[in-house]
Image (cartoon, rainbow, N blue to C red):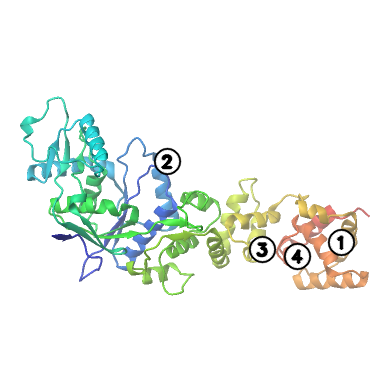
């Protein structure tokens, strides 16, 4: 008999409650961030609840820095959760109590197999070409036969006949024969609950209606569904998202972008850009690429998630981040840039004013906040500027002499405005029989220390008369 587990459709006035439940054995990686985003959007789209649970029962591998990094990463992404954070380790007594209730109800049993017996069982099955799983040795034996020197585990009495079908919200119906499922351990010999039991009990107690997670958990779902049914609990709706691969189609690794969220922050990506990019990794709404948070909440649902692995592409992320940089408020960007540049030396109020005034010209050319900060560094740099390698090649004796002849022309301008300054420079070039570029490029390196910068006349207006003339004088050949 086929035992259906869940229906992915929301029917009637059902309350949607979802959760993101990371294990703090490492930082919040990019795949986990996308899972959190999909859960958050699903809850917000349906007017439901988004819960955060930290699955910290593995005390040897769970660390406080990892927990803090996960929480900070979710906050930075803007995925606010509802209610208090649930720490799974604080619920362990409840998990063990459920195992005891199952034992009393006959849906679980004590297994007294020793580690040696279990190892022999697996070796025998392997030699016979059979799947290696627990064979139910103690499923129906009299506990009176139990050896006195073996602390038992508690195992689930899993169904053996028929099959189980998961009506997955992404993968569609998935069926597994029940004889492929073994009597999994619920409670270890030391009394600690296993992951399978803890997850089910927590999801039930938190009234989780929909479980949205990576498809690497799909096989776990059939075992967890058996625990739900053994307790007479409603099984939530399951949806399993395909994993993220690299741009080359290979499994995602650090060289592809399998990094912690904090690394993307340090590389200069904006949270709204990363949210937009992660949204489009495996989910789509027509041809829309740039999707605001409001649009994402309005449009997101499970039917937009594809069944094939998504491919992570840094070039696409860079382009999307550049778009959001251009849309960002200058005051916010000045704060982000100042945080980076201020790590080298404090930035004066004059420097902050220059950053703010010059931000429109800067953000049009950058794709990350880190790049934006590097491009902006010349505005707050101390004189004399350090020239980069390409600027040093331009700073020939001839170029320095041209700057020396240009300096009094610039100093004579009573109106300090970009159009006036440009007119003066062009007039000087024409009078001296020079090409405009032969003057403009030395002027650029004098002002910025680089051959690349925003428009030089805009730079001059941002720096102001005194700083502009001083920087030109620093590089000009003495007369």
Q: Is residue 252 above or below residue 277?
A: above
Residue located 87% across and 73% down the image: 427
Which numbered circle lies on residue 222? none
Which residue extends farthest front? 128
Residue 459 in the image: above or below residue 250: below
The mark that comes first in sequence, 3 or 1, is 3
List the residue tagged with mark 4: 456
- Label 3 vs 4, first from the N-terminus: 3
Residue 124 location (% of width, % of height): 23, 36
Q: Circle 1 — which element?
A: helix
Mark 2 and mark 3: Cα distance apart in space:
38 Å
**Residue 390 horizontal side relative to residue 184, left or right:** right
Disc 4, SS = helix
Q: CA distance from mark 4 to mark 1?
A: 15 Å
| 240 left or right, relative to 13 | right
Q: Position of residue 280 (x, y in %)?
A: 44, 65
Label 2: which residue?
65
1 or 2: mark nearer the eye: 2
From the image, which quarter does the N terminus lie in? bottom left
Rendered residue at 24%/52% (across/down): 203
Residue 407: mark: 1
Task: Report, in whole angstroms, how far the alpha carbon at label 1 lies from the one at label 2.
Answer: 56 Å
Q: Residue at x 62, y 63 (%)?
A: 363
Residue 440 in percent (x, y) is at 81, 65
């Amino acid at each position: 008999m086929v035992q259906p587990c869940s229906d992915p459709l929301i029917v009637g006035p059902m309350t949607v409650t979802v959760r993101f439940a990371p294990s703090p054995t490492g930082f919040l990686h990019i795949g986990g961030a996308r899972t959190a985003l999909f859960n958050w959007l699903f809850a917000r789209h349906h007017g439901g609840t988004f819960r955060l649970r930290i699955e910290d029962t593995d005390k040897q591998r769970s660390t406080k820095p990892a927990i803090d990094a996960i929480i900070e990463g979710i906050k930075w992404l803007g995925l606010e959760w509802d209610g208090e954070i649930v720490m799974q380790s604080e619920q362990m007594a409840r998990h063990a109590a459920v195992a005891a209730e199952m034992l009393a109800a006959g849906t679980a049993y004590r297994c007294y197999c020793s580690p040696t017996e279990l190892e022999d069982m697996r070796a025998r099955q392997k030699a016979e070409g059979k799947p290696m799983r627990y064979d139910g040795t103690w499923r129906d034996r009299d506990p009176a036969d139990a050896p006195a020197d073996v602390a038992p585990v508690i195992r689930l009495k899993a169904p053996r006949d028929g099959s189980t079908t998961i009506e997955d919200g992404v993968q569609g119906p998935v069926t597994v024969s029940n004889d492929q499922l073994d009597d999994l351990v619920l409670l270890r010999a030391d009394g600690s609950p296993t992951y399978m039991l803890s997850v089910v009990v927590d999801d039930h107690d938190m009234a989780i209606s929909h479980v949205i997670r990576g498809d690497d958990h799909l096989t776990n779902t059939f075992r967890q569904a058996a625990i739900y049914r053994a307790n007479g609990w409603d099984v939530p709706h399951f949806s399993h998202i395909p994993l993220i691969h690299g741009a080359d189609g290979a499994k995602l690794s650090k060289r592809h972008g399998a990094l912690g969220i904090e690394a993307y922050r340090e590389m200069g990506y904006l949270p709204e850009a990363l949210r937009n990019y992660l949204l489009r990794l495996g989910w789509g709404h027509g041809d829309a690429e740039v999707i605001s948070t409001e649009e994402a909440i309005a449009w997101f649902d499970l039917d937009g998630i594809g069944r094939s692995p998504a491919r992570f592409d840094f070039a696409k992320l860079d382009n999307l981040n550049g778009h959001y940089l251009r849309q960002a408020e200058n005051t916010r960007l000045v704060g982000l840039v100042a945080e980076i540049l201020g790590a080298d030396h404090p930035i004066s109020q004059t420097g902050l004013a220059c950053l703010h005034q010059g931000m429109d010209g800067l953000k049009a050319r950058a794709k990350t906040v880190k790049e934006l900060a590097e491009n902006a560094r010349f505005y707050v740099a101390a004189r004399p500027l350090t020239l980069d390698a390409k600027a040093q090649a331009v700073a020939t004796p001839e170029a320095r002499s041209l700057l020396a002849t240009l300096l009094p022309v610039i100093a004579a301008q009573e109106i300090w405005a970009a159009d006036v300054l440009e007119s003066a420079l062009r007039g000087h070039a024409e009078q001296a029989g020079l090409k405009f570029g032969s003057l403009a490029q030395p002027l650029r390196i004098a002002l910025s220390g680089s051959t690349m910068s925003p428009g030089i006349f805009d730079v001059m207006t941002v720096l102001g008369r005194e700083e502009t003339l001083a920087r030109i004088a620093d590089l000009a050949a003495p007369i």
